[in-house]
Image (tube, rainbow, N blue to C red):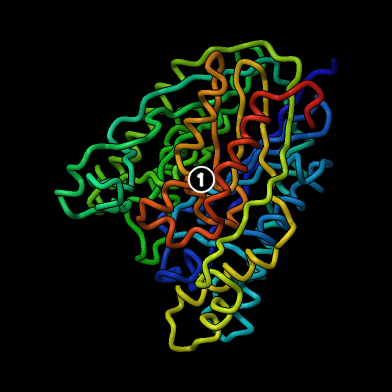
Amino acid sequence: MPPLHLATFACDVTPPLGHPLCGGWIEPVRGVDDPLEALGVVLLGAGKPVVLCAVDWCGLRNEAFRTWRATLADAAHTTPEHVSLHVVHPHNAPFADTGAERLIAAAGAPHSLDLAFFDDCVKRSADALRASLMKAKRFTHVGHGSGKVEQVASSRRVLGPDGTVKFTRYSATKDPAVRAEPEGLIDPHLRTLSLWDGDTPLAALHFYACHPMSYYGDGRVTADFCGLARRKRRADDPAVVQVYFNGAGGNVTAGKYNDGAKENRPVLRDRVYAGMVAAWKDTKRTPVSGWDWRSEAVKLPPRREAAFGAEASRKLLDDPKATAARRANAAFQLAWLKRADTPIEVNCLDFGAVAGLFLPGEAFVEYQLAAQKLRPDGAVCVAAYGDDGPGYIPTAKAFLEGGYEPTVALAGPDSEDILLKAIRRLLVPEKGAKK
């Protein structure tokens, strides 16, 4: 086998003054508290190059996702199916669906995205990737470790005695009675997949499932507490590249431990940082001579309710009296319906001792926990927030339980079975599975 090599790249993707944030739903850019980055690694030497990239943006949907992914693939001399592109999901950050933005512009609604800025970010990130290939370093070992994150994640969905949602615990929850409710179903562990040249660490990829917002909506750009934890960890050893992937935390927030006070941001940052440090201390290294890359194309069915159909969405988008947020949501729904037969790829990077699973949308934590049960003898690091075309991906029963997420999820309840089957095929492949 030829030696394996690792290239790493970084690109600033901070939006300019006045740019919409969170798809235009909140205050636009008034200033920058900390810059936003696109960070990634390229794995070389075992078949087609593999690209893993995380962007400090709120979302990448449909055409925007596919455009950015294809451009990175071209720069890495690989195929789009060998690129896993994700967002960290802070809300004081851009949200990109280029097809939806064109619909918004045609309808005269408030903009959700500057298309020229988007194109520039895509180009510069690809340029950074391309340049990094000339500086690729050999790697010989893969490492993995986990650390418990204390008092950050909590379930957003607090169920009552009748089995339906009685409280929604948002990222910032001011009501002390709601914060006092039990932590609920979460994955409390941050997992780190690392790449090494002998005893020398080269890169650390962190995975943790929780909405990353402490507070937002003030027009101040920030990667928020998860991005800030990543930067604090990078300061410990600047030679080690740090990349943070948001796990399947669609129904997980910091709401139990955060009332939205500004002083909580560094507190939450330090708790996630402590999890990163603990995972690093827990790291076990294994010699590696290659990897398996597997991909499954899935089609998640759209919602069947009339309110989610093209006619209702078109009417809402064209309504000048509707709020900017509702008109933008209608455009995102139309863009989701327009993609029709264009599938979403779910990917798996398998080193044997540790695997990375890369999911679309705001998948619920149940998908992450189910994935980990499939590999009880090995570590599974889960990233969600890939192609965000469907938005939230609840479990089927969540649609019956109510709560916030099913009111805006664009894919229907049948998505659970489809996605779980794909996860099983990726993590427990049959002989001859697609690579």
57 sits to left or right of 290 = left
**Residue at 59% across, 85% down:** 107
Figure check: 426 above or below 305 = above
Tell me which amino acid carries mark 1. Answer: Ala
**Residue at 56% across, 23% down:** 374
Residue 31 picture quarter: bottom left
**Residue, disc 1:** 363
Q: Which of 73 and 413 is in front in this view?
A: 413
User: Can the viewer see residue 55 in this picture?
Assistant: no
**Residue at 31% across, 53% down:** 170
Q: Which residue of the protein is positioned furthest toward the front in this rendering?
A: 162
Q: Which of 183 and 45 is in front in this view?
A: 183
219 sits to left or right of 309 = left
Question: Alpha-carbon neighbours of circle 1 within 10 Å: few (<14), some, or many (≥20)?
Answer: many
x and y percent of residue 90 in the render? 45, 53
x and y percent of residue 208 in the render? 45, 35
User: Can the viewer see residue 223 in this picture?
Assistant: yes
Residue 194 picture quarter: top right
x and y percent of residue 83 in the render? 72, 42
Q: Which residue of the protein is positioned furthest toward the bottom in this rendering?
A: 320
Position of the C terminus by quadrant:
top right
x and y percent of residue 79 in the render? 81, 43
114 sits to left or right of 404 = right
- SS category of the residue bearing label 1: strand
User: Number of marks in the image?
Assistant: 1
Position of the N terminus by quadrant:
top right
Figure check: 435 above or below 291 = below
Figure check: 412 above or below 86 = below
